[in-house]
Amino acid sequence: MKLVKKLSQRNEKGQVLVILALALVALFGFAGLAIDGTRVYEARRQNQSTADSAALTAAGVAQNVIKEAQPDIFFCGDSPTALTRIASDQGITSAQIAAKEDGIVLARYDISTNGVTSFCGTDGKRTYMDFTAKVTTTTNTTFARVIGINSLPSNAKATVRIYPYQSAAYGNAIASLSNTCGGVVFGGTSITTIIKGGVFSNSCIDGNGGPQVDVQTGKILYNTTYTPPTSAGGFLSPAPQQTTNKLADSGLVGDPKCPASGYSAPPSVGTANPGNYTGIKVNANDSLTLAPGRYCLKGNLDVGANGTLIANGVTFVFVTGSTSFNGTANLNLSAPVCPVGDKYCVPTGFTEDTKFLKGVLMYMVEGNTSTITLNGSSTNDYKGLIYAPDGYVKINGTSDSKTFNTQIIAWNVTIEGNASLSMDQISDDTFHYQSSVEVRK
C-alpha cells in the first residue's frame, strides 16, 4: 500500500509540472503578444500623428493660397480653376515635406498605401477642399512569430477640410434655388454686366427676347436646361454650362430672429430706428431716413412717387410682404458692414445674435413667396445680399441704371425690360461665410 501511495504522489507531481510548463508557455505567449501589440499600437499612434500633421499642413498652406478668393476664381466643379489647382498642388507638396520629417514618403494624389490627395467640392452651401493623408507601416513581431504572425500592419488616415472666406451660393452674383424651370430669366432687351461672380440655377436659365449678359470673371451654370435668347443681338457670355452641382434650397443664411408678435405702425417720414413694424411707407414727395439695424416687417416696404428712402447699414427682414417702389422713387439702401479689415465686428444696430446679417440688405423669410421688385435707375442704389429662398426677385430698369453692389439669391430671378444693369460684389458690401478649417477623421 505504501508503494502504491508513493507512485500516485509521484504521478500527481509529474502532472503538475506538465500543467505548470504549459501554463508558463501560454503566459509567456500572452505576454509576448501584449508586447508586440504595444509596439503595433505605438506604430499606429505615430502614423496617426504623421497623417494628422501632413493633412493639417496641407490645409494650412492651401487656405493661405485661396484666402478671400471668391469661387469665381476658386471654383470646384466640372472644370476647376487655376487657383484651385495651385492651392491643391502647394498643399500636397507641403504635406510631403511634413511627413518626410517623420521618415515617411507620401505619394502625390494616391492614398492606396502611403500618400496624400485632395478633393475639391461643394456641400450645397459652400465650396471646400479636403486633404487626406494616409500612412501605412509594418511592424515586425518577436513573440507572435511563435503562432505564425511575423508582422502586423499599422494604418492611419486623416482628412482636413478648408472653407475659404466666401459669399453664399458659391459666390455667384445671381442664383436661383428653384428645382423647376423658371429659375433665372433674362428678358426683353436688358443688358446685364456681372463684374464679379457668375450666374447659377438649380434648374433652367432662359433668354427670353434679346437680352445681353456679360459675366466677366465667373461662369453661367444651369442644372437642367438652357434656352438661348430668341431675338437677334441677344447673347449670354461665357456660354452657359450644365452642372451636376446644386444649391441647398434653404438655410443658406441663418435665422434673422424676428419675433412672432409686437409689430407697431409703420414709420413714414423723418427718421426711424430699428424695430418691428407692420411695414414701412414713404408717401409721395416725402423723405425717410432709417438708422442702422435690423427692421422686421410684416407688410410692404413702400416708397411712393418722388419719395426718398435712405437706409444705410440696414437689413430689411420680410416676415410677410415685399417691396413696392414707384418708378420715380429715390432709394439709397445698403446692408450693414464692418470697418475695412475687421471681418468679425458687430455692426452698428446689431447684436452678437444678429451680427451674421452683415452684408444682408433684404431677407425674405422661408415660406414668404412674395416678389421683391427692384427698380434700377440713376437715382437708385442697392448694396448687399438680397435673399428670398421661397420668393421671387424681379429687376426692372432703365438705360441709366446704376451699379448694383449686390448678390441676388431667390427661388426665381427675372431681369427684364430695357434695364442696363451692372452688378459688382464688393466683399465689404455682401454677405460672407467666414473661412474655417475642420478636422474630419
Image: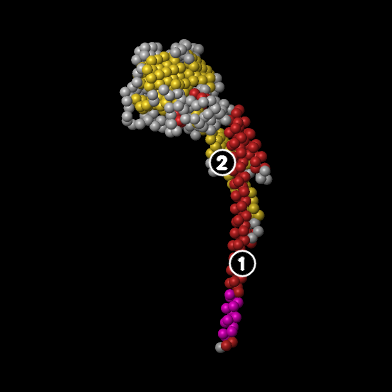
Please tell me which residue is depicted at 60% across the width and 73% down the height of the picture.
18
Residue kind at label 1, given as amino acid type: Val
Could one spot residue 48 in this view of the protein? yes
State the SS at label 2.
strand
The kind of secondary structure the magenta stretch mainly shows is: helix
State the SS at label 1.
helix
Mark 2 is surrounded, within 10 Å at the Cα level, by few (under 14), some (14 to 19) or many (20 or more) other residues, namely: many
Could one spot residue 176 in this view of the protein? no
Residue at the spot of label 1: 25
Farthest residue, direction bottom: 1
Q: Is residue 76 above or below residue 105?
A: above
Q: Is residue 220 left or right of residue 329?
A: right
Q: Is residue 144 above or below residue 302?
A: below
| Residue 355 position within the rendered picture, expressed as x and y whole percent measured from the top left | 45, 30
Residue kind at label 2, given as amino acid type: Thr
Callouts 1 and 2 close, C-beta under 8 Å:
no
* Tag shown at residue 327: none
* Tag shown at residue 159: 2
- The magenta segment is 4-16
| Residue 219 position within the rendered picture, expressed as x and y whole percent measured from the top left | 53, 23
- Quarter holding the N terminus? bottom right
- Quarter holding the C terminus? top right
